[in-house]
Structure formats: structure tokens, C-alpha cells
Image: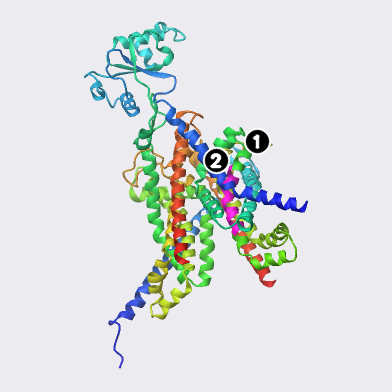
Amino acid sequence: MNTPVYPTGYHLRKRRSQAAAFTVFRVLSYFIVLVLFAILGFIIYKGAGVLSWDFLTKAPEDGMTAGGIFPAIVGTLLLMLGSAVVAFPIGIMSGIYMNEYASKGWVVRFIRLMTNNLSGVPSIVFGLFGMALFVKYLGFGDSILAGSLTLGLLSLPLVIRTTEEALKDIPAAIREGSLALGATKLQTIWKVVLPMGMPRIITGLILSLGRVSGETAPILFTCAAYFFPQLPASIFDQCMALPYHLYVISTSGTDIEAQQPIAYGTALVLIIIVLIINLLAGGLRKYFEKRLKIK
Amino acid sequence: MKRFLEKAVKWLLTASGFVTSLVILLIIGFLFTEGAGLFREKVIEEGYVLAVHKDNPVKELTAAEIKAVFDEDITSWSGLGGPDMEIVTFRLEDADEYFTEEELGAQYEYAAGKIDSLIAATPGMIAFIPESMVEEGAQLNLIEDNAISPAEVLSGSEWFPTATPAPLFGMWPLLAGTLWVSFFAILFALPFGISIAVYMAEVAPERVRNVLKPVIELLNGIPSVVYGFFGLIIIVPLLQHVFGLPVGESGLAGSIVLAIMALPTIVTVAEDAMRNCPRALREASLALGASKWQTVSKVVIPSSMSGIASGVVLGIGRAIGETMAVLMVTGNAAVTPHSILEPLRTIPATIAAELGEAPAGGAHYQSLFLLGVLLFFITFFINLCVEYISHRNKAKNS
């Protein structure tokens, strides 16, 4: 005969508590989706009316209450480019070193610890550092050069980590195959390892560009100009930047009410940049995955 | 040739491997040299002195006392260890209350002698005057001008970097503001973060997960100024309305914005940790007849606790260091907060708001770098904690 092991109602309670817990999790998760759509929807709704060809291609006018944000868009693109020039080569090389050259041991652990720490350093500390080193000590002044260097250092840990992770997943057999055919270590890395890791590295690089495009604190004191309607002529010029522009027009200025539509428009452009970058990275990831599978 | 190339590349790669370590060292070095300069600065503004009557027994005043005297919070010398005598404050701007323009001279050329004799004639006077206005042999005492003390800076409860004659650099209100806002942010983010992580890792069907994952990534990608802007336009007026506050810019507004911003970090790390929970553990639990929820709550979560903890600690780090969003919504009042509904100010927001106006190399400028050092070490410590937690976990699992 079956003797009941469980007290009466145990299974019911078990099922009920599971249903309750999972419902809570589901609701909270959907709530976050809602929050995201609220933020995006609000800014798209308010900003869409402001967005026009003129807005994207004209300089601000009338004390920032009219005109467009062209110089800020150009400035942000320049800073993204500049930081890429700084961070990509060093970051990729550093990642290769970590995965292919460094002997596993305290060196790798130390470097990884430092890289992780660097990625945790608040962006405003990068701003202070950039100001002390590039603006003051090296005498670059408030310039695109100083801003790019600061932002480059900020995105360095991200680039290193993605490179390292991309290379880590490449099977050792492939490297050994190449070496067995008589290729040198450098040839193996250049011709075999890097091309295989490239898709994921590129995805990481794009995401790091996204991060750079939205950073404000590091460029506050190294580069960003409140109002600089002409386009920068050299890397020693200041420039406007979208995030900084959004900050100043939404918190200060002569006429905050009149500036508000411009603020919505600027926020929308920033969001669009982030969306494009995320879609691009996601799309590339899918594309490369598919290609690898077919192979 | 080929071998040379191999060697050269190897060295180049090795060198770039150490760039991050070098950057950390440079950050520490530069922030420290600028910040430590504060303790070499004098309490009283450079080029100025505080002069008192020669019979006044008070020889030393702290920065806080000087400020209280000139704000007329302290009105008698007895409060400062002197005789029971009323304090008369004197600033250079007050000179025309005592003297006519002719007496002072067109270029203030006679002012020095006049002021010196005024102090000599007024026993209770304390005068804040340029050094050059103290004539040789004048009958007055100068208050000892000590260097700014680290204890006063670290535990001082007043942040008035632009006050004259003696600016106050008490960092406690800023530190308290930072911790306060971050604490509430994590309090809000934690239930959401853990629930979403559990849902994504254990419950959600693949299709829902494919929606949630990009949503979380997108939340992570939205620039902090956009969060700040959203907070300023939506959350701040909402809080003002709901709680009937005089101003909506408050610690709570900052915490809510920070909670949304810290969420992706917590979710990503915690979800990863739960996914990496060994399959065998999960299956053993299910095989024993446990329901899915029992397995998750009694097996998966406890076994991935360290990963979840790292996520939470990283989230805290992110909240503490966040600058722009907080700067835009917390109202930036540099006072020790008593309630989360009051305006307050965090360390990063202070640096961002004030560095532009602080003259380079001055005490104010240096104090902001010192705040940077403080912030750097807080986050450095947090990162070490994460490292320790995940390292211990690795050791346990292997």
C-alpha cells in the first residue's frame, strides 16, 4: 500500500508557490521592457517633430534656442573616430598578448586585474586624469586630441576583453595545425587566429564606439565646447559633442523652455546612434554566426 | 629578418599588454599629486591675513570657526576661548563704512595705515585684509595660518569651497550623498535585477529571452545624459507632485535613475552565473522530485550566489561612479542629507559641476582632485571585492 510521504496539500502548495514566484519574475521582467519602451517612446515621440534636415545640418542659433546640432554631431563622430584610433590598435594588441603570448600565471592575472579595475574607474575620474595629463601636463589644451585620448583609454578595457574572449574560443587545434605546417607564431596569429576571431572582435569594437558616443564626463574638461558653431579645423581645436550639448541645453542657458525642443531632438539623435550601433553589432553577430555554421 | 620581426612584434604586443596597468599607475600618480597639494595650502585665502587686536588672546582659529565668525554665527570672542567681547568683522569692502574715500586715497594708498589703526582702536575686531595692508610695526596680531588638515577635510561636515576668508573642504556631506543615493539605487535595482536574471536564465522560453536580452543591452547602451534628461523631464516633476516636495530634484530621483542604470550590470552578471550552474546539480534536484521553483531557489541560486554577489557589487560600483545623470537630477545641495527626499550632491557630480569654475592649481581645484582620489579608491576597492568573490568561486568549483 502507498503511504503518503508528503503532508496533505504539499503538491498543491508546491505548484502554487512556483506559479506565484514565476509570475512575479515575469511581471518584473516585463516591467523593465515597459520602462525601456517608456524612455524610448517618450524621447522618440517628443523628438521626432524636431528632427529635420535643417536640424541635422545647421549650427545652433539664437543662443541655442533655434537652429540645429550639426557641429555637435560632427564633434561626436570625430571623438568616436579619435578614440578608435587610440584604443583599437592598443586594445587588440593587448588582447592578443594576453591570449597568445603571456604565460598563464601571475602576469596574466595581474594584467587582467588592472584591466578590470580600469573598466571600473568612473568616467569622471577619467575626465580628471585626462585634464591633468593631456590638457595640462602635455599641454594639448582643451582639444579633440585630449578628448580622444581620454575616451580611448576609457574604452580600452572593453576592447581588450572582447579581443581576448574572441581569441579564447578558437580551438587550440587550429593553431597547432598552422604551426605544424611550418608557419611561425606570428604567421599563425596573423593568417589564422585573427581572421577567425575578427567577427567577434569587430562586434566588440562597434559596441565600444557606442559607449564612447554617449560619454560626457570624460570630455567635460578635456574637449567639449559649450558653443563652437564652426567645424573644428584641427585636432587641437575644441569641439561640441552631442551628450555634452544635451547636458547644457537641458540644465542651463538663457531660455530653458525654448531650448527644450532642441534637447528632445538631441536626445533622439543620441538614441538613434545607440540603436544603430546595437542593431549593427547584433546583425553582424548573427551574420557571422550563420556564415561560420555554413562553413 | 623574419626572426627579428617575430621578436619585434612580440615586444610590441607585450608592451601594449601593460598599457592598462600603466594607465592605472598614471591615474593614481596624477590624481595624487594634484590632490595632495591641498594639504600644503593654507586655511586662509592666499595673499590675505586675518588681523586682530594685539591684546586679543586668540591666536588660532579653524577654518570652520573662521567661517562661523564671518557668517556671524559666532558673535562673541568667548566662544573662541577669548574674553567676553563682541566680535566685529571687517572685510576690505567694509572700508567705506569707516572711512571716506579721501581718507583711503584714490588708489587705497592710505588704506593700510587707516585699517591698522582701526584694528588697534577696536579690541573686538577681526579683519580680513590683504597681506600688503599690514604695515611694519603695526599694533596687531595675526591669526596663525595653518595648513589645511586631512582630518578636517575627511570628516568635516561642511563643503564651502568658495567661502572667504577660509574655504571649507569637508567631504563628508558629499561622501554621505554618494553612499545614500547608491544605497537606495541598489535597494530598488536588486529585486528587479535578481528577478529578471532568474526569469531569463531559468523560466523564460527562448523566444522571450531573445526579446529581453537586447532590451537589457539597450538599457546598458543608453547614454547617461539621456537618462539624466529623462529623469529631469519625467521623474523629477512626478516626485515633486507625488510627495508634495518644494523641489523635485532629490536623492530619490537620483536613486531611481541610477537603479535603472545599474540594472543591466546586475542582470547580465547574475544571469551568467546562473546559466553556468552545473547541469548535474539541477538535474539531481529535479530527479529528487523538486519542482522547478524549488530547484531554482534551493539549488541554483545558492550555488551561483557568488556570481550574483559580483553582479550586485559591480552595480554598486557603477552607481557610485555615475556622474551626469546624478548631476542632472539630484539638485546638487552640498549638505549632509537627512532624508532621501532632499536635494543632495554626490562626489562625481561635485567634480563635474565645480571643476570648470575652480581656478587651476588653487585649493578648490586640488580639493576636487582629492575627491577624485577618494572616488578612485572606492571603486578600486569595489573591484577588488568582485575579483576576490569570483576568484574564491573559481577555486571552489575546480
The CA span between labels 2 and 1 is 23 Å
Say above or below: B224 vs A66. Answer: below
Magenta-highlighted residues:
A150-164
| Residue to which mark 1 is pinned | A236
Circle 1 packing at 10 Å, graded few (<14), some (14-19), many (20+), is: some
In reply to whether residue A155 is colored magenta, the answer given is yes
- Could you tell me if residue A249 is visible in this image? no
Q: Which mark is residue B26?
A: 2
Q: Is residue B80 magenta?
A: no
Q: Look at the picture and state if B233 lies above or below B198.
A: above
Q: Are marks 2 and 1 on the same chain?
A: no
Q: Residue at x 47, y 37 (%)?
A: B353
- x and y, in percent, of residue A83 in the image: 62, 46
The kind of secondary structure element at disc 2 is helix
Specify whether B121 is left or right of A22: left
- Label 1 residue SS: loop
Residue closest to the eye, A95 or B183: A95
Q: Using the image as rendered, state which of residue B183 and residue A47 is in the foreground.
A: B183
Label 1 is placed on what type of residue? Phe
Relative image position of residue B265 (x, y in whole percent): 48, 57
Residue at coordinates 40% horizontally, 12% vertically from top-left?
Answer: B134
The disc at residue B380 is none
Give left or right: position of B266 versus A69: left
Which residue is rendered at x = 53% and y = 39% of the image? A129
Amino acid type at circle 2 is Leu
Residue A219 is drawn in which quadrant?
A: top right
